[in-house]
Amino acid sequence: MELGTITEGPSLFKNVAKDYFELVDGAGIAADAKLITELTQSLSFEIETRFFITVPVYAGDRLLENYLDGIRPALNNRHFNICVFVNATQDKFSEPDFENARAYHAAVITKFNQECGFAAACLLTAYLPGPVSMGRVRKLLVDSILRYCIEKDIDEPVILCNDVDLIASSPAYLAEIANEFSQNITPVFVAAPIGYGYKGKIAMGLPAGIHVPELYLFNRVQDAINLCTRDGRIGSGPAIWPEGANFAFAGSAYCAAGGFDPMRTTGEDDAMGFALKGLWANGSLNNPTLNWQAPVYNSSAWIVTDPRRVLAAIQSGRTGIEAWAWQSFTENPGSEMDTHALAIACNKKTGLLRAENLIQFSAIERNKNWEFVTDRIGWLFCRSVVFDRRARDLEQFKAVAKAFGLVITDGILNYEPLEFEANIDWDQSTLLGDLVDTFQ
């Protein structure tokens, strides 16, 4: 286990962090500077490593045991200190309920630490005046850890962002992340794969015997979009897209980029990614001492998360890719979504693509079932890519389709005003065969 680096003089991290906190304390939410001081004083770990996992938790959630079970195999191979931040707002959560949530999560962490044989995880809590944003929650959590590192003389901390709905991870997950930040010149950030209820063709976190083809296809279309983005086949050039559930960065880079935006209800991870990428692109011009390499995507550092929010979108007749935009996070907390009930509802709902449609599917006999399956796949794919907007024109749209497993021969794609049309060559498309292999 790597111990924290004890510094004898000002380090890059400390210098950048000093400037960052002077700016944040002067321009941020007034009460947060005091709250960060209080949270910092509550942090305590037995092992002084520079690697930290941040896990924001809405007080109504009861997923922490699942999270710890899901991360444990990776933690056994490479130690990170885990910081759990249970929070709620006074307008949405009663004080007695918050105290019960605090006690519940404290008991879960105590049990986990006893099983580890040392204090591997630490609990922070905050009962906040509302409304509150995801950007503010992540900022409070990360800033508290950075303050802790300054006080403990831990140089260049590495922050890995997770969400509490993680249910599985690669055994090499944490080792892969740590290795990326152990180079002479570290990446400005590291992103890695996230599966929602599926790891490849394997269902995870769904009721036994239940498949949700539209959830599986959501994973495939999101993977295709992200792959084409990384390769530069869509957008204005190659780019790595970070997601807050599996996103890591060095403390100095975070501070130089200005930290999470506390005003962002959602999309705080996107904004942070853009700011960090800007450091790499422009940092050597503005400040030669801030030298990071390009963002990195580590395909081995995968995790799988509970797909409840994606299932809720699908069950409501939308595509999974719309899950983070069609409902307010604060008005529709994930804690009120029952993953198993949603999966069963999706499995039964008329109008959705169901496993039975694929079990009965024949590529030879172009009957009503063939028409329904192909129409539904075409609708799901096209709506997803158009909603995402990273594919800028028809040629880029075709590139995503090819990565997804479809061949588009011709069509139209314009956004202003929105015009879309696509002709799919099903005989040349590989997706149908893949679906039959997966679900039959």
Image: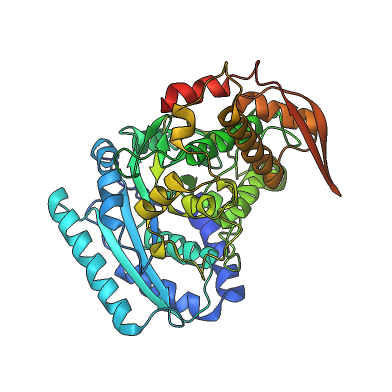
Quadrant of the rendered structure where residue 170 is?
top left
Q: Is residue 397 left or right of residue 76?
A: right
Q: Nearer the viewer, residue 38 or 112?
A: 112
Q: Nearer the viewer, residue 285 or 125?
A: 125
Q: How is the image coloured?
A: rainbow
Residue 270 point in image, percent of width and height: 61, 51
Residue 152 point in image, percent of width and height: 33, 59
Residue at image position (80%, 40%) is: 420
Q: Is residue 183 visible?
A: no
Q: How many numbered marks have been drawn onto this rendered protein structure?
A: 0
Residue at image position (76%, 32%) is: 422
Q: Is residue 362 visible?
A: yes
Q: Nearer the viewer, residue 353 or 70?
A: 353
Looking at this view, name the residue that lies furthest to the right.
417
Residue at image position (81%, 30%) is: 411
Quadrant location of the N terminus? top left
